[in-house]
Every structure is written in structure tokens, then in C-alpha cells.
Amino acid sequence: MVGRFDDWEKDDKGHLKVWPMLAFTTALFGAEKVGLRIEIGTQQPKPGEPVPALQLVLDPSQVRQLAEALAEAEARLADARFTTIATSGPGNA
């Protein structure tokens, strides 16, 4: 059985390689594509230094799929937080 993170990049200790998102911007490329620039890193760079970023171009169906995936992830996160709060409230020790 394949695990959820089996195909994600990992470091030499087996930990997932992930980066915090610092910012993102979007742009339209004509009427056909969307540009998405996701700035990443562990801290803001010094003035004048380049910001590490992933720059993507997406077609409309990819934009919809990404929007739906992010909305689903946010809903699952909100549900997990609600469940945690509900089970750790007063009288539920």
C-alpha cells in the first residue's frame, strides 16, 4: 500500500522537505493562462537578495482543481480544529 507522502521529497533522515510560504502573487497571461508565483523560505531575505520562489503557469482547469483542493484542505483543517476543540473543552479531560 502506498502512503500519502511516499512520493514526496525527503531529506537523508526521511523527513519531508517542505518550506513555509512567505507570499504569493498571481498574474494573467492573456486570456488563456494564470501565473502563480509562490515565494518560499524559512525567513525573509535581506533587501536586494532574491526571494526563492516557485513560478507556475496554469490553465483554467488546473486553476479550478487547485482552488478546489485548497478549499477541501481548508475545510478538513477547520473540521480537525473544531473536533480538537470539542474534545478538549471543559468536562472532556
Image: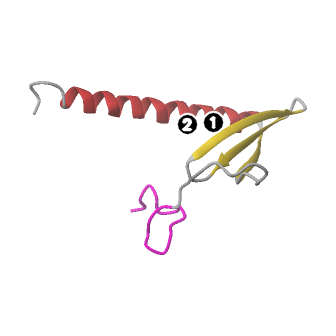
The amino acid sitting under disc 2 is: Ala
Q: Quadrant of residue 32?
A: top right
CB under 8 Å between discs 2 and 1: yes
- In the rendered view, does 35 fall on the left or right side of 46? right
What element does badge 1 sit on?
A: helix
Residue matched to label 1: 65
Residue stretch rendered in magenta on the structure? 1-16
- In the rendered view, does 62 fall on the left or right side of 69? right
Q: Quadrant of residue 77?
A: top left
Residue matched to label 2: 69
For disc 1, the neighbor class at 10 Å (few under 14, some 14 to 19, many from 20) is few
The amino acid sitting under disc 1 is: Gln
What element does badge 2 sit on?
A: helix
Q: Position of residue 62 (x, y in %)?
A: 70, 39
Q: CA distance from mark 2 to mark 1?
A: 6 Å
Relative to 54, say whether 1 is above or below: below
Relative to 64, say whether 5 is above or below: below
Residue at 19% in and 31% down: 88
Q: Position of residue 3 (x, y in %)?
A: 41, 59
Q: Position of residue 45 (x, y in %)?
A: 68, 51
User: Can residue 8 be found in the magenta stretch?
Assistant: yes
Which of these two is toward me, 78 or 50? 50
- Dominant SS of magenta comes to loop
Residue at 50% in and 67% down: 10
Which of these two is toward me, 48 or 66? 48
Q: How is the image coloured?
A: secondary structure
Q: Position of residue 93 (x, y in %)?
A: 10, 33
Residue at 61% in and 32% down: 67
Relative to 64, say whether 7 is above or below: below
Q: Quadrant of the N terminus?
A: bottom left
User: Can residue 58 be found in the magenta stretch?
Assistant: no
What residue occupies the far right of the structure in this picture?
30
